[in-house]
Image (cartoon, rainbow, N blue to C red):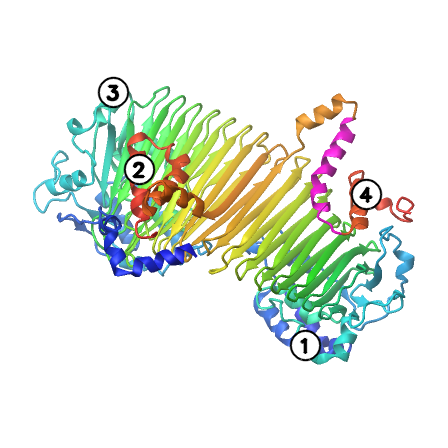
Amino acid sequence: MEQAKDNNKDKDPKKRTDNKFVRKLTEEKYKYGFTTDVHTEVIPVGLNEEVVRLISAKKGEPEWLLDFRLKAYNYWLGLEMPNWAHLQIPEINYQAISYYADPTKKKEGPKSLDEIDPEVMKTFDKLGIPLEERLALSGGMAVDAVMDSVSVKTTFKEKLLEKGIIFCSISEAVREYPDLVKQYLGSVVSYRDNYFAALNSAVFSDGSFVYIPKGVRCPMELSTYFRINAANTGQFERTLIVADDDSYVSYLEGCTAPMRDENQLHAAIVEIVVMERAEVKYSTVQNWYPGDAEGRGGVYNFVTKRGHCRGANSKLSWTQVETGSAITWKYPSCILSGDNSQGEFYSVAVTNNYQQADTGTKMIHLGRNTKSTIISKGISAGKSQNSYRGLVKVGERADGARNYSQCDSLLLGSHCGAHTFPYMDIKNETAVVEHEATTSKISEDQLFYCNQRGIKTEDAIGLIVNGYAKEVINKLPMEFAVEAQKLLSVSLEGSVG
Amino acid sequence: MQSKEQYLNLYREYRSLIGRHSAPVMNVLRDEAHDELLRMGFPTRQDEEYKYTDVEAIFAPDYGINLGRLDIPVNPYDVFKCDVPNMSTSLYFIVNDRFYLKALPKVALPEGVLLGSLKEIAEQYPDFVSKYYGQLVDTRSNAITALNTMFAQDGLLLYVPKGVVVEKPIQLVNILRADVNFMVNRRVLIILEDMAQARLLMCDHAMDEVDFLANQVIEVFVGAGASFELYELEETTPRTCRLSNLYIHQQADSNVLVNGVTLMGGTTRNTTRVTLAGRGAHINLCGMAIADSHQHVDNHTFIDHAVSDCTSHELYKYVLDDEATGAFAGKVLVREGAQHTDSQQTNRNLCLTRQARMYTQPQLEIYADDVKCSHGATVGQLNEDALFYMQQRGISHAEARQLLMRAFVGEVIDEVGLEALRDRLHHLVEKRFRGELGKCGDCSVCK
């Protein structure tokens, strides 16, 4: 009932002007929505074998990779778009999208790697991504900046190489380290995995490649920033991370896109291989353009992310803060085949207005004494739909497997939906698997308590939401955590009070 | 050839025979059910709802069906001795799918209460029965129910008029009896008007060592303020397959308890769909399964909170031994506007051997914000510490395991409202864990 009253309050014009704070924030809601005016070479729209060959040729790829792409393309042709998710996906015309856009291509003259179009530089400056190493915070982080289909620049590449760490765009890795790429590409997510994995495998453009050699602890955070700029294009990046024995790396991923009225497609693959005693932390702050308040535009985010803990005692941790995208279809997963390996999944997914999210994880226990933890926090507001979908599978040989899952949903408003679809397939009697889920709204008591102490309703809701998500946000590296917290309050702007 | 063809052909060939031995009210729905089954076919394991139970394979064998309603010589009192002691019930029998008229209890039911053969009551009061029969089922999306609607010729009808309280629990014993592999399509229709009260205990028994396929559809209408308790106890054979579809529709402030216990069987698939259509309605769904050898138990529940202020409580527990498989899927839907919903679901499972399999899917779909919903699911083993503690105190390992397992399922039995039945279930469960259930031939233990 309180909610209804609040809505009425909002309709009252007098009250509305009082709420300047909310208005200000609502207006600057998606501050990454600008476009960059840069000459971009875009290949004609449509998808066929020629396009796949063209992308491969543009990147100067070896024969084996072209074969891989073509196999994936032919497999994709025989597939149908999956419809099992709790999502209303409008029909996507795959022939109306351009599959390759290169903003680094100069109009004339030869291309030099050192020379980046100042417009592109400015774009990343504006996004707060330091591409000049001297400007980066001391100790800072190494960034691979990807705009549309091409990696613009990778910082600290040389410094990292001194330790044997390879951090570069995947296109460069194909040229420079073909054996490594050939060994691991598609080894965790096969092109036959699912519809979008097949599509990505056929047309993937850029993304990052990370290799941490044996016994090396990566001294700085590695990060990739994805930016969609060109219109009518899709982004199909591919990331491959290999952490060899006893190594450690923390990897961050960020993404934004301009505000456009049409929907843009983003179908990525992330593959992670974790060897003996190695540890990988993968953090995402996903902030693709979510569409406007009426549900126009926004990015369709169909992503396959999977890590394989191959070695004993390895550990993989996924942390994600999902606030953007019109539609999210994403299940970062762990295959725990090494004995004593550990998988973690921490997620905050926020949906507002007409956003839809179907996200969660898969923990596949194959090795002995494997452990996994799932903490998922969903927040839905406006008219959005937010689903958690997860699988915990314990194989026959996974003695002593242990899983704990907790998925909580918070509903702000009476027109949104929060759903949980956990699956547990247990094939070993020594497994201990626990799942808990709760759904609730912000309690009147909590709000009243804050109000009483002079905290305004909007601020109180912000506080409570942040507290609710804290368990997950705490898992993020510091710089990201601050950003994520801000993002949470901005994403929910206009949904309450 | 798909499994459905043999049934569709059988129906087309014997349509008039089926109709002759049933009531017109039931015949009206047959053709449509036939068309729906033809269109859908049986679900396969590709279907999300039937991922763990291969329905196509269940229907593939050639079963005998008693469409001509031939008398099967049996005296239920002779074959069935395992009454619940100390519980005074009004006892009725259904042999296969046929209401057994030769052995009716002497005690009369309260005035106005109708209990008897669905076919006969439907012939007597066609207008009344047609208001309810087939109204809750989803023949358009459920092929198993469609098949039942196509073939069902008889079963049970229970009607309790407004404000009438049936004090004495009603016990219905379903006996499966045949000399050849046999299929039964049983239909039960239960109508409780406003403020009525009744309790029904249904036991399934199979008397012969043949393959039985019991396909049961139950429709339950519960009026405003009415109260209904349904206990289902399955004690059949490893060669019996039970498919049950239970549909419950509840009006305001009604109170329903369903407790389904699977003690012994081959393949069991229970689907329960509850619609809470009036404010203040409450449903308590409980279930328990003890399965060993190659038993398969699959419980699917769906609770639709269609209006505000309803509560639902769900508790399912499984103990899986040997190579048994268990599946549980519980979905709770809270529709837009169904504020102040309180829904709790718990599914706990014990896997006792390496080969035992458990699949569980608790699901929530929520479109209202002022709700309290939670679900929890666990799969695990007996607590080593507790076992050790008991052994330390001189309780043998085997005995300690028994104790813990009984305590584990005890929670579900405690939800049983009838005291005598509760005691009896505790006793049966104990016997089941000791592997002595099959020895119940002359029932010396209970008597």
Q: CA distance from mark 1 to mark 2?
A: 62 Å
Nearer the camera: disc 3 or disc 1: 1
Does the stretch in magenta take in B413?
yes
Q: CA distance from mark 4 to mark 1?
A: 41 Å
Q: Which mark is residue A112?
A: none
Residue named by callout 2: A253
| Helix, strand or loop status at disc 1 | helix
Where is residue B71? Give x, y as percent: 86, 69
Residue named by callout 3: A162
N-term mark: 2 or 3: 3
Pointer 1 chain: B
Q: Amino acid at mark 2?
A: Glu
Q: Amino acid at mark 3?
A: Glu
In which quadrant will I find the N terminus of chain B? bottom right
The one nearer the camera, B250 or A478, is B250
Relative horizontal placement of residue B398, taking residue B317 as reference (left or right): right
* Label 1 Cα crowd, 10 Å radius (few <14 / some 14-19 / many 20+): some
